[in-house]
Image: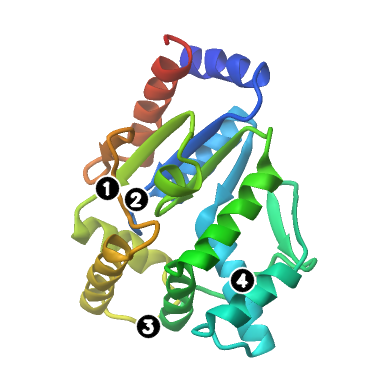
Amino acid sequence: TMNYLEDIKCFVRNNRGLVIAIDGPAGTGKSTLARKLAENLSINFISMGNMFRLVATELIRREISYSNTDEVIKLINESQFEFENGQFYMNGDNRINEKTEIFDYITSYIASKQEIHKLVSKMLRTIVKNHNIVIDGRAAGSCVFPEATVKFFLDANLDVRADRRFIESKDELSHNKLKRKMVERDLRDSNREYAPLLCTAQHIFIDSTNKSIDDVYNQVLRYIYYSLILT
């Protein structure tokens, strides 16, 4: 693995605009994996979800109705977005509300609206142009960066995903209720008209159910090596 890593790092240093996209539902270990990859390759990690969480946080702060798409778009257009030290700032602030059920719902709702998703995606592409990035999301590789250098789709069985989310959730939800919410969210994400949760033919599919984060990381590293260096 070390040799893979050194070779990939060398390749990354000599190139610009590389995008490693990691898609998949909640609780599959996308963010943990994306962060670890970005850190070890010394490139920026971007969470697509956090982009929408930033907007959702600002909506709540300004008491703007999340279901009023025109108002949300107006807010985004009038806001200043910056990317510094691997952090996104919206109007100088990078703080995001805690992950609660209602906050997750608002975030997922605005992300499902085509005009909002397109606007946020376009802005993101402009900001990170010519940077090497690892990005995770529901549709980072299928929709936001369709030309991504390498695309992964991470999945895991529902019980395992619920376990993982249960540990990090700030809600007082029972395990079963959390599982039910996940199923609802999966259905909503998979069936939304624009940027649905989708494993395309270009995605490399990885099931993380019985794998540690290191197992998945090593597998992903091998694929990146084959995709970038041996092609």
Decide: is 45 above or below 63.
above
Labelled disc at residue 171: none
In this view of the protein, which residue sits in the foreground, 74 or 165?
Answer: 74
Number of residues whose C-alpha sits closer than 10 Å to that of mark 3, classed few (under 14), some (14–19) or many (20 or more): few
> What residue is disc 4 on?
55
Q: As shown in the figure, which amino acid type bears the numbered disc 3?
A: Glu
Mark 3 to mark 1 CA distance (whole Å): 25 Å
> What residue is disc 2 on?
24
Quadrant for the N terminus, please.
top left
Residue 84: x %, y % from top left: 76, 49
Residue 88: x %, y % from top left: 69, 56
> What residue is disc 1 on?
155
Give the image quarter of residue 217. top left
Give me the residue at 33% from left, 35% from top. Answer: 203
Mark 3 to mark 2 CA distance (whole Å): 25 Å
Give the image quarter of residue 130. top right
